[in-house]
Image: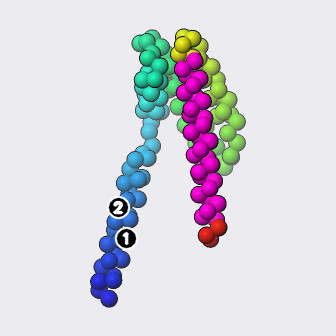
Amino acid sequence: MKKLILAALLVTGISLTGFSQDRAKHTKKTPEQRAQFMTDAMDKKLSLSDKQRSEIYKVHLDRARDMEKNRSETRKRGEKDRSKMKGQFEASEKKIERILNSDQKKAYAQLKAQRHEKGKHRKAEFKRKRNKEGKLN
């Protein structure tokens, strides 16, 4: 009996450790950190000039600040409408495209298409997982 209880405690401890490590990976980033991350990723893929990098960082920073403000407002009101955020995102995308040269625009369009496909797959996987869990309950 003692061995069974000890084994149960050991399994519980290991699983809790795993959950706490997952949560540590998803710490909330500041708008500045998100803007820097997005700009670095674009620079890596598109080889931005220093001027482009600076301008795109500003666009990303404005976007991150606006998105954070909108998220907090929608949470307070309990809204699920994301149309305002979508509009702001599209406006910032237009600003970014104005900054890029023609070759970079083509590469950026390909990156966005890849990101869109990846998002479709994630959404489908999420639905599959949710349906599977729903059937078990």
Depth check: 1 or 71 in front? 1
Q: Quadrant of residue 32?
A: top left
- Disc 2: which residue: 17
Residue 62 sits inside the magenta stretch: no
Residue 125 sits inside the magenta stretch: yes
Under mark 1, the amino acid is: Thr
Q: Is residue 12 left or right of residue 55?
A: left
Q: Residue at x 45, y 36 (%)?
A: 30
Depth check: 6 or 85 in front? 6
Specify whether residue 39 is in view.
no
Question: Tag 1 or tag 2, which sits nearer the N-term?
Answer: 1
Rendered image: mark on residue 12: 1
Read off the magenta span: 106-134
Residue 10 pos. (x, y %):
32, 72
Q: Residue at x 37, y 54 (%)?
A: 21
Position of the N terminus by quadrant: bottom left
Under mark 2, the amino acid is: Thr
Residue 19 pos. (x, y %):
41, 59
Q: Is residue 43 left or right of residue 5?
A: right
Q: CA distance from mark 2 to mark 1?
A: 9 Å
Depth check: 134 or 29 in front? 134
Specify whether residue 31 is in view.
yes
Labels 2 & 1 near each other (Cβ < 8 A):
no
Residue 91 pos. (x, y %):
64, 23
Pointer 2 local density, CA inside 10 Å: few below 14, some 14–19, many at least 20 = few
Q: Residue at x 70, y 42 (%)?
A: 81
Q: Quadrant of residue 62?
A: top right
